[in-house]
Structure formats: structure tokens, C-alpha cells
Amino acid sequence: MEDLSPFIENINHKTRLSPENMERLITAFQVVKVKRKQLLIQPGFVAKYRIYVLKGAFHSYVIDDKGNEHTIQFAVEDWWLSDYNSYIHQTPATQFVEALENSIILQIDHQAEQQLKDSNWELATLFRVMAEHSAAYLARRIVSNLTQSAEERYNEFAAKYPQVVQRLPQYALASYLNMTREFLSKIRNDKVRKK
Amino acid sequence: MEDLSPFIENINHKTRLSPENMERLITAFQVVKVKRKQLLIQPGFVAKYRIYVLKGAFHSYVIDDKGNEHTIQFAVEDWWLSDYNSYIHQTPATQFVEALENSIILQIDHQAEQQLKDSNWELATLFRVMAEHSAAYLARRIVSNLTQSAEERYNEFAAKYPQVVQRLPQYALASYLNMTREFLSKIRNDKVRKK
DNA sequence: ACAGAACGATGAACTAGCTTAAGAAAAACA
DNA sequence: TGTTTTTCTTAAGCTAGTTCATCGTTCTGT
């Protein structure tokens, strides 16, 4: 049995649920173990699940016309992840969601989420708050993409998530920050040399 | 008296409201006339309103360390706008929201929205759907910023919003698409010449 | 413990997009 | 309607970031 306390904390931080509703929510999620490199979502298939990472690391990415991979989003412990366009609108995904490490997740399927939202006030509020936070977060990301240089974007990320930065493969981080792996390598090593 | 039918249509497209709830919703909004160049939101002040554009055009923007203006978002007729980070979390704004033309808006203040959400199921659902759609939309925007060249971003925007593109000042569009006004000018005029 | 595969470093040549500057056109407002 | 201010165009020179190619290093599964 997995320890769900980080998940419960995460929820409590968003909205207050009665013990019964917390129970209902938890019951709606399944615990799943995922092997490194395993895909949870693939283009062409409808994203069935909203994912919470209990242990491990994931990234979502797209592959462009030239065959280049672009990481859209990371998720490590206590982060949420999906292909939101696919999940929210239940249309075929355009993104891959792939495990970067052997991981353990909680997942809820779209139909179960819909039922919780339709039948219960507190749980509907929870999902509303989650959507609001996502939108606000994504808006911040757009601002930093529009206003910062490659090096500034790296520095911001490294300062914000000092632990995470160590763990992620550099090629994935580079594309997330909208630069080539070679250029990220240069930024990092210039930094070391200056010290 | 303004014609609110586009607003009503917009809401109906998101979720079905009973006539009484539609009435309550409409009553919570105020109609406001705004002059070109007028600011609705400014950095340092908490964004009090969520804004729906009935007539006219707006953009939100930030000013970076070097004094450069970056348009984050546009809104013309039937679009929504705010500084979401500020509005959702009720923290000081980082963005300006400015009228590009003389305009007419509907605005709801955060407290009124909160009351509607807290007291009414259908209206809570409406705001949840709005947040979900925003998040999905912003996610798409991040993907196109990560995967497309400057010219491709312009072409996509022009194809998607052929009317809007004509109306927006070029300097604002350029910064929205993450390029200089000079470069956008070049892209546009190269295109004309090829024909 | 080892072979194979994936990942990261480095450097040289290149280019998409930026900067600067100055003039032309268009829009705003009195 | 004319004048002032703002916006757009063009072009030359530049640079942040890419591409390509090669080599060393570190994982990973068996």
C-alpha cells in the first residue's frame, strides 16, 4: 500500500474537503506503477486520465514536422500532468506523456472525474480551483517565454526547482526551455568555468 | 442599453444556465465604456475584474527590465481578459490591460464572482468550464511557441484570426508572437512580394 | 561485470531574428 | 485641415542561438 499523504496534502492545499468527500475522491483514483520509458498518453488516442505523480518523474512532449521532440511539461513528485486539451475536451491527444523514471502515479479517468464534479459541490470546487491554478501557472510560463533570454529561462528554472534540475535529462530540459541541448550544455559549462 | 446577446451566446456555449441563473449572472456584470489607451489593470494593483469585451479591442502586456513592451494577450469582441494570476489569486498585477480602441466591456468583480460560485451550482460550473478552457487554450499556445518559427507563428495567427490581424497594431502583434516589429514587417512584406 | 545504447561536451560554421537608424506613411486630435 | 505623434518600412551590420559532426561519459539491462 502506498502512502497517500502527499496527495491528501496537495488537495487540502487547494480546498477543504469533508472526510467523506476526501474518501470519495481517493477512491476514484487508482494507484498505478509505471516503468521508465512507458507511455501513458500517445497522440491519436484520447487522454483518458488526469495524473498525479506520487513517485518518479514524467514529461509530456510533442514531435514536430522535422521530427524534433519538444518537452511541454515536466512532473515529479506532487505534480499533476495530462494532455489537457485532450483530457478536458476528450479529443485525440497531440502529446506523449512518458515516464522518465520508474514511477508510481494516481490516476482518475475522465468519466469518474465528471461524476464527482456533477454530483458533489466540494469536489466540483476542487476541480475548479485546479483549473484556475493551471491557467494562472500557464500564463506565467508564457510571460517568461516572451520576456526572457535562453540563459535567463534556465536560471529561473534552476533557482525555482534546484532539486528537479539535477534529475531531468538535459535534452528534455533544453527543449522545455526552448533551446537546443547543445546550447544548454554551453550555458551550464560557462557557468561552472566562471566560478 | 447595450445588446448583450453575444455575451449570452458565449455563456450558453460553455454551459446551460436556467433563465434565473442567466439573469443573476448578467446582473453581476456591469457595462463600462472605455476610451482608447485607458488602462483597466496596472502592475502593483490587484486586478479587481474579469473582463468580457462587448465591443472594441484590448491587449494585456508587461514591460521587461530593458523597458520593452510584450503583449501577452489580445481580446476583441466576445473574448475574455484579465491578469489571471492577479485576478485568481488576488495578488498585485504584473500586467497592464489597455484599450486599443474605444470599447465597451462587461466586468464582474472578484467578490461578486466568488459569491456566485459559492452559492450556485450552475454558475460554479460555468466558471469551472471557463478556467478549464483557459488552461487548455494556454497550453496550446505554449506548444506553438515551442514548436514553430516566427513566420509559422504569424501564419497560424493570421489564418486563425484573419479579421483580427488587420485591426491590431503591428508592434503589439509582433511582441505577442515573440518577434520584433521590424521582423514582422519583413515577414509580411516578403509575403506580398512573392505573390 | 560488460556490451550497447543513450546522454552530454565541445567546437566550427552558419542563420534566424535582433539592433540601430532614418525616412515614409498613417492616424489622432485640436 | 494642418500639425504632431505614433506606427510602419527598409536596410546594413550584428549576435544569440542552431546545426552538424565527433568524441567522451554515463547509464541500463542482462
Image (spheres, coloured by chain):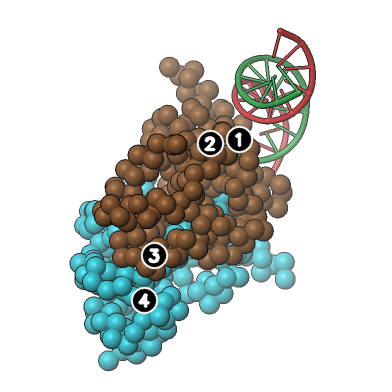
Chain colours: A cyan, B brown, C green, D red
Answer yes or no: are tags 3 and 2 on the same subunit: yes
Return the chain for callout 3: B
User: Which residue lies at the image location 47% right of the left edge and 42% below the top edge?
Assistant: B53
Q: Secondary structure at mark 3?
A: helix
Q: Residues within 10 Å of mark 4 (few under 14, many from 20)?
A: many
Q: Amino acid at mark 2?
A: Ser
- Vertical comparison of B178 with A19: above or below: above
Residue behind mark 2: B103
Q: Secondary structure at mark 2?
A: strand
Q: Secondary structure at mark 4?
A: strand
Answer yes or no: are tags 4 and 3 on the same subunit: no
The image quarter in which residue C19 lies: top right
- Vertical comparison of C10 with B163: above or below: below
Q: Earlier in the sequence, mark 1 or mark 3?
A: 1
Viewer-closest of B100 and A143: B100
Q: CA distance from mark 2 to mark 1?
A: 7 Å
Viewer-closest of B20 and B165: B20
Q: Residue B117's mark?
A: 3
From where the camera sits, is residue B81 visible?
Answer: no
User: Which residue lies at the image location 60% right of the left edge and 70% below the top edge?
Assistant: A159
Q: Amino acid at mark 4?
A: Val
Q: CA distance from mark 4 to mark 1?
A: 47 Å
From where the camera sits, is residue B29 visible?
Answer: yes
Residue B177: horizontal and vertical position, in percent?
51, 41
Residue behind mark 1: B36
Residue depth check, mark 1 versus mark 3: number of the one nearer the observer: 3
Q: CA distance from mark 1 to mark 3?
A: 32 Å
Q: Quadrant of the N terminus of chain A?
A: bottom left
Return the chain for callout 2: B
Residue behind mark 4: A53
Q: Amino acid at mark 1?
A: Arg
